[in-house]
Image (spheres, coloured by chain):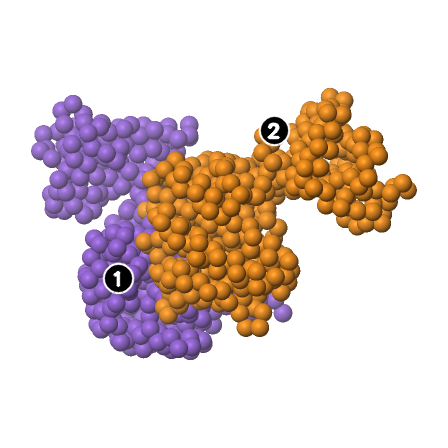
Chain colours: A purple, B orange
Amino acid sequence: MKLVEQLAVQTDSKILLVVLDGLGGVPLRDKTELEAAWNPNLNALAARSGLGLLTPIEPGITPGSGPAHLALFGYDPIEYQVGRGVLEALGVGLELGPGDICCRANFATVAANGVIEDRRAGRIATDESAKLCERLQAAIPRIGDVEVIVRPGREHRFVVVFRGDDLVDGLSESDPLHEGVPALPVRPLSTDAEKSARVANEFVSRAAQVLNGEGRANFVLLRGLARLPNMPTMAERFRLNPACSAVYPMYRGLARLVGMRVLDAGQTWDSTVAAVREHRDEHDFFFMHFKEFDKAGEDGNFELKQELIERFDEEIVPQLLDLKFDVLCITGDHSTPAVMRGHSWHPVPLLLSSRYCRSQLRVEEFGERACARGVLGHVSSKTLMNLLLAHAGKLVKFGA
Amino acid sequence: MKLVEQLAVQTDSKILLVVLDGLGGVPLRDKTELEAAWNPNLNALAARSGLGLLTPIEPGITPGSGPAHLALFGYDPIEYQVGRGVLEALGVGLELGPGDICCRANFATVAANGVIEDRRAGRIATDESAKLCERLQAAIPRIGDVEVIVRPGREHRFVVVFRGDDLVDGLSESDPLHEGVPALPVRPLSTDAEKSARVANEFVSRAAQVLNGEGRANFVLLRGLARLPNMPTMAERFRLNPACSAVYPMYRGLARLVGMRVLDAGQTWDSTVAAVREHRDEHDFFFMHFKEFDKAGEDGNFELKQELIERFDEEIVPQLLDLKFDVLCITGDHSTPAVMRGHSWHPVPLLLSSRYCRSQLRVEEFGERACARGVLGHVSSKTLMNLLLAHAGKLVKFGA
């Protein structure tokens, strides 16, 4: 049991953790996206808050969204590694049992000779994909004693879950990650996993029969085959009653994994805030997620990322302040610098506002380099929860 | 297997790690050696680089050269402890086997009553010492079934290696580290090491017979008796093809220990750079070592250390920039403040230049206190390699 878990107590104070996905950047010309943005509200808040930089995993390590968020929730991402299939399954709202094998699946196009022509079946529309998922679900409800659950995702993506006895993970992927080669068989990485591999391979082969004759989506590829890890909840660990407001499935899935109640965040930034406002009295910890910064960074669109931050500053920050939480933390899960067109290892700007903050000398800006000189210093993401609980008065003294 | 090892991939990008031995300082009057120096090239580079401070081992811990360098190479210096005898043996170019016992040896002057009069035999000339080593080698080729290898070093220093079966380290030193007392017997620190101790003591006693009648160098003292530790190479751990350019044997030895190719660095700063220039296309990681700053610090010569830094700035930094590496890191292994006349625990200035750096706000200087406000923050030396690999694009993402 970690020290913070021994010291955590339930109180009435309230914490709001706001994650701007991929917030951190790298300078284009002279400034990062955040530094280039006109942010009067964030800057005013920064002047009276504690600033710092979060290291998501370790110096130099670029995280995916899964480990980056688990760290923010106070879970060591090296200790708790979650398979991608599990995250996808949670994201589409499936209630998982501990023995379920979850797969991230794609519709794909395969030529008559078995070679993959398009790993994404021409990125078929979400509607079309959903109909194909219905056909697969109807045609393959079970494989032997194993229940099969098929759920649609966005475009060519969907989720398959195998539910039954003696299913063990440790399975290779059928997606070769390249086109122009055949799909791979799912291989068990231990003898325990032989039944699971047999079920997965039979699903692929029966799906190909069901999809035979489809123009583009005539095959399925499986990735990230994994079971639900055994994770203690935030309630158990931190005596919190947490809730999540996030539009995107992946982040709702991550929140559910650590025992958060998943609110209906709608589809917009405003509805994401509204969900927290509506349920403000029912929980003492809220995780609010905004995705779009990461997408702009992944697309290499510096100006769009900058504009999104400015829009967030103007439209959302005043609403966050109006919610009057005891602790308000605004940060990112990782950096997604537009100049790198992807996630990066760079530490993430951290703003922590509470009545017990020290603020900086002569720093009146929320930006990477201002944060590098902040009073909170460099903080590992996995210890952020310590700081949030402490500033909310939710940790008792260690020792006498 | 550490996380960074799981994520490292081979790419074409190139890293240059430049170590100014003992770079860090402590102020005399108002500035450290580095801060007092006139460094237009380093300062211009600092303004567009990431700055930080390296903690060699742990806060407050003063390292020797061995652990300080291993940490820079990405090896936890607590986990991998290397005996001084091993470093010396590697430094003179010996190819060691895993069972060899290596000793750092001194010629010494012993009086007729057995008391040590001079632990360094008047610092006899290197030529004279080399001749004595030849005599020892010829007279003592073996001790029982154990091969004896004697190699000269600088001045009174030489290396002895015992090669044979059942040799185990964990041996005390024969050098009492004081004059006016007799030499000590080498004692085994475990019963396993009894044979090794017997061989070492017989070597000392037979060497004294060989040297009987010499005026000054009539005895030998043994220190740092140790075996080669079992270390994975940088190629295995980081997928690098590394090379070293260093004038001094100790640093070539450290580089060889982690699997670097040791280039012929000649005897000067210019030839040290030239070796890297010549072999630039053959490797993706270079370690370049400059020793003189440490010596000036050890001698308490603040002005000389300052002048050496200025000379480095003028003569070497432009050449380093001309080499056009993707990642250029200029730092030290530890601090050697002239005012302390020795190594110290003070964190070491770190400069990291790459196209993916954030740079500092309003910091346009390479110095200890500028680095304390740098965007990289305080970094443990053993995680520097993570940052070098990351900035070179040699680490894939962790998790999805």
Q: Nearer the viewer, residue A290 or A31?
A: A31
Q: Quadrant of residue B92?
A: top right
Q: Is residue A207 left or right of residue B89?
A: left
Q: Quadrant of residue B376?
A: bottom left
Q: Residues within 10 Å of mark 2 (few under 14, many from 20)?
A: few
User: Where does the image place residue B101, in percent across and percent down from the top left?
Assistant: 68, 33
Q: Nearer the viewer, residue A60 or B106?
A: B106
**In the image, farthest residue toward the top:** B145
Q: Chain for mark 1?
A: A
CB atoms of marks 1 and 2 within 8 Å: no
Tell me the element at label 2: loop
- On the image, numbered disc 2 is attached to which residue? B97
Residue at left offset 13%, top offset 40%: A122
Q: Is residue A25 above or below residue A146?
A: below
Residue at left offset 48%, top offset 60%: B310
Q: Is residue B93 left or right of residue B355?
A: right
Q: Which mark is residue B64?
A: none
**In the image, farthest residue toward the right:** B113
Q: Which amino acid, mark 1?
A: Arg
User: Where does the image place residue B295, in percent across and percent down from the top left?
Assistant: 60, 54
Residue at left offset 47%, top offset 55%: B312
Q: CA distance from mark 1 to mark 2?
A: 53 Å
Q: Nearer the viewer, residue B336 or A354?
A: B336
Q: Which mark is residue A29?
A: 1
User: Where does the image place residue A10, in percent across and percent down from the top left?
Assistant: 46, 68
Q: Nearer the viewer, residue B29 or B5?
A: B29
Q: Is residue A10 left or right of residue B217?
A: left
Q: Is residue A64 left or right of residue A110?
A: right
Q: Which amino acid, mark 2?
A: Gly
